[in-house]
Image (spheres, coloured by chain):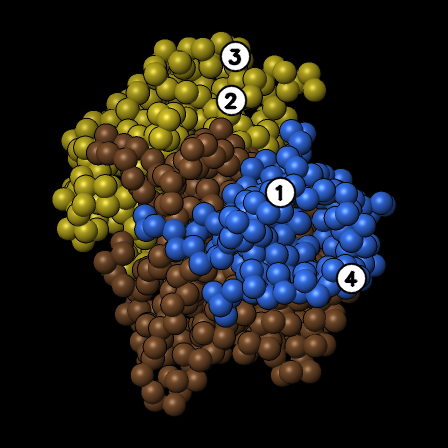
Chain colours: A yellow, B blue, C brown
Amino acid sequence: MRLTLGPVLFNWQPETWRDFYFRIADEAPVDSVVVGEVVCSKRAPFLAGHMPAVIERLVAGGKEVVLGSLVLVSLPRERRQMAELAEADGFLTEIEDLSCLAPYAGRPHAIGPFINVYNEATAAFLAGRGANRICLPPELPLGSIRTIAQSLPDTTIEVFAFGKVPLAISARCYHARIHKLTKDNCRFVCGQDPDGLPVRTLDGAGFLLINGVQTLSDTCANLAGDVDALRSAGVRALRLSPQTCDMVAVAKLFREVLDGRREGEDAVRALASVYPQTAFANGFLYGSPGAQFVRSMTLRSQ
Amino acid sequence: MPLSNSTISKVPPLLAMAMRPLPLLPLQPPLALLLDSVRRRHPGIFERLGAHAGKRFGLRPTDLPFAFVLEPRLVRPRVLAVRHLPADLDVRVSGPLAGLVGLVSGELDGDALFFSRDLHVEGDIEALLALRNAIDDAQIDLVGEALSGLGPFKIPAERFVQNWLRPAAWN
Amino acid sequence: MELICPAGTPAALRVAVEAGADAVYCGFRDETNARNFPGLNFSREELRTAIAFAHSRKVKVLVAVNTFARAGALEIWHRAIDDAVDAGADALILADLGLLDYAARRHSGQRLHLSVQAAAANADAIRFYVETFGVRRVVLPRVLSITEIAAVIRDVACETEVFVFGGLCVMAEGRCSLSSYATGQSPNMQGVCSPASHVKYQESDGRLVSRLGDFTINVFGKDEAAAYPTLCKGRFSTTFGTGYTFEEPVSLDAATMLPGLRAAGVTALKIEGRQRSRAYIEGVVRAFRRTLTALDAGEPVERADLSAMTEGQTTTVGAYRKTWR
């Protein structure tokens, strides 16, 4: 199985962002890396200056570089950016919004987890137009993943395996709203929360995270203990989504599990010390509430 | 959040107090008749209720000194008048009689009554929604059907309905 | 502009027709549509009867098959499409690429509408659906301002339908997994958001606590208007305080926006609320019919006070005004 590092979803300082990818390029045992600002088009200019160096370093590190589109494209400026992206040669694009799809007809591209692929018919439709890799929506249960993967043996089916789970995208910026700013004059306050702004229930339970226009889970997806189930379902790649914890360590632990050098359960425990004070979850995979952590051992015996 | 804007009229406390010593037993035959007539005329209700037909619903008019337990089963459905709702119900709904009747007759919107805090609900909300949707589709003339089962009490009951269950706020 | 009205039951459909709907939309009683609520929706037989009734009054019926088909169970969704076509539906409202593909191939003459659940928020996305599947109308997501709607309409070769009243998604529709995160059931998969099966209300001393699954969604003080525990309209806390982090429990009421929507070139106006009662449908449809009649006659548009019908008992014009963002 392959490992893909998803795009950084949060608003990191440009230098932090660049250095993160430099280290990934040099040290992380991942096969593909999706780069680019996918959440908010207003953040993109800050990263643009570092992009060529990041791509160069990743390629030198033997990684396949994939360029991510925006998740929600609405402004004319955003549509122009996406049209330019479609003209960029040499790199695979990962489509995160269907509005970007048309220009890729008949040429290889990847489909990201923000596209609604819930069944084999949709997956086959996209594969027929050139998608050779599909990262499925995080809320999909194992049964659906299996059906899709087995009906499309020539398409790499990928599953969101680590990171805070993107749950929703909106036209409204919640960071701006909380700071009582308008979206157009947001002062990039989302940059204050490089791992998301926690949203708790009134009785103090962790619930969600805000990342500008995006809402994520407070729990961190962790499917390290479910690798056997995913592999036998026909999944060919796992996605790790960047958090502020040591992502090189995360990638190494997943790599060890994929290579059979470490038990999944053991990796789950080890990940808890790499990303402390974080609750893990894998409920989506088993049709349970996504916030829950279902022990994979008990499931295997079912 | 704005304050709720309740417009539902209530049975006056004096009248409710006057009803308190009345025995509940005489209510049973007209209630049974009412339910039987609803069951015959609106069989679609049970299909809509699906698995929720086996559940027990407590309905408590907050302005009356008694309550009802509804068991909307396809075979031998029951409605019982009780002084106090038992503990082992699946769902409890309480609110002014006019609100509960308006809900069943389709003249009032249940969600709106809940939003305005006129209606209080507890328990199996899915079962309650199923019941609400099934009843809303059936278009039951609850008052008409109830009155027809009252025999000699029809005239005073009609007067009660005119006064307390058809407030201007409904228009 | 056409008035498109919801119906969760045959009785509600008749009420909508009587109250002045140009078209009514509804769905089958299963997971194939996005209002898969207990006791709601239509059997095959009920749909046939309802369509015959609506057609006799020159009212159209649009059938929503707008969830995303479950892998390995496509036939359930295919049957819903086939049966809706068979029953004489004037249009199918679809969101899933695989189902659009199926419907376009299998029923080539059938009018297809793109559901709001497909979240086609710009001209490129809409053009893709129009060119690939022959979609004739797109229901625009509730994220666009009127200026943006006008720009989209100039750019695309299909009709547009916009929401003017009812529940308001804060997130891009069809791209939200908040509900399954808390309950395991989502609009996209099971056709339910914040399902009643996972709702708990606890009331003591006038204080009402609403919970969804394991999470407290809101606490209402005595006499404070209540709301259903829809995840994105709950009260939460952050380091910046406690409040409605995403959106207040308000409903959309765009009655005052109708002149602007007409000028923008919108084809149809949609009222949300298949899960609501006949009383709601009657009140809201009648009010909008009156407003449209006034608009057509060149009379000033008066906004009916429908706030009592709405969640939180307050309304907003939502994203139609850009400051909402």
Label 3 crowd (10 A; few <14 / some 14-19 / many >=20): some
Q: Earlier in the sequence, mark 4 or mark 1?
A: 1
- Helix, strand or loop at mark 1: loop
Give the label on residue A265, or none.
3
Q: Earlier in the sequence, mark 3 or mark 2?
A: 3
- Helix, strand or loop at mark 3: helix
Asked which quadrant contains residue C217, the reply is top left
- Helix, strand or loop at mark 4: helix
Give the residue type at disc 3: Glu
In this rendered view, identify the residue nearer to me: C305 or C25.
Answer: C305
Q: Which residue is mark 1?
A: B20
Q: Which residue is mark 4?
A: B152
Mark 3–mark 4 distance (CA, rounded to whole Å): 75 Å
Q: How many numbered circles does the render carry?
A: 4
Is C268 above or below relative to B102?
below
Residue plotted at (40% across, 15% down): A271
Percent across and percent down for residue C258 are 36, 75
Q: Which residue is mark 2?
A: A293
In this rendered view, identify the residue nearer to me: C303 or C212.
Answer: C303
Check the residue under mark 1 and report the chain it is in. B
Residues at discs 4 and 1 both on one chain: yes
- Helix, strand or loop at mark 2: loop
